[in-house]
Amino acid sequence: RQAITTLQRVPLIIFPEGTTTNDGGRLPAKPGLGLIAKQAAVPIVPLTIKTDYRLFGTIELIAHEPVRVTDFGFRRYSSQTYHEIGERVLDIVYQRVDGGAI
């Protein structure tokens, strides 16, 4: 509930996997992203973080087109549906800008 209230006032960064990794590897999405976005009625802006993983190295942030939970075409929502929304957002995040995989 606190995340939804906060999200309705200010942008919030949520990792669909529920955590981060040291090597940038992909983890399975958790259902929280889809659930929070639907309940708060806000768009999801997928954000790709590219880094060379070096101390004082470069970091590139790529903001993709916003998507709404309703864009995915689900008629009913469940934990599985919210998980699928997270996976689809991760599909966007893990695509290179030039179309190849990161």
Image (tube, rainbow, N blue to C red):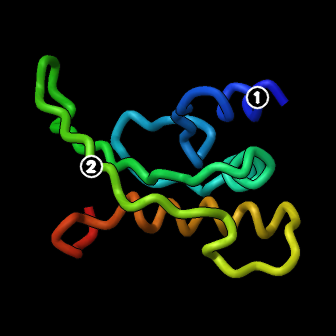
Image point (57%, 35%), residue name: 19
Q: Which mark is residue 5?
A: 1
Task: Where is residue 77? Give x, y as percent.
Answer: 85, 68
User: Label 1: how many residues lie within 10 Å, few (<14), some (14-19) or many (20+)?
Assistant: few
Cα–Cα span, label 1 and label 2: 26 Å
Looking at the image, do the residues carrying marks 1 and 2 touch, with CB atoms under 8 Å apart? Answer: no
- Figure disc tally: 2
Within the image, what quadrant is residue 61 found in?
top left
Task: Where is residue 87? Give x, y as percent.
Answer: 58, 65
Q: Is residue 17 above or below residue 4?
A: below
Q: In what quadrant of the picture does the N terminus appear?
A: top right
First in sequence: mark 1 vs mark 2: 1
User: Along the horizontal axis of the image, is 84 left or right of 77?
Assistant: left
Q: Quick one: which residue is furthest to the top in this view?
A: 56
Q: In what quadrant of the picture does the C terminus appear?
A: bottom left
Q: Amino acid at mark 2?
A: Ile
Residue 30 visible in the picture = no
Which residue lies under the disc numbered 2?
62
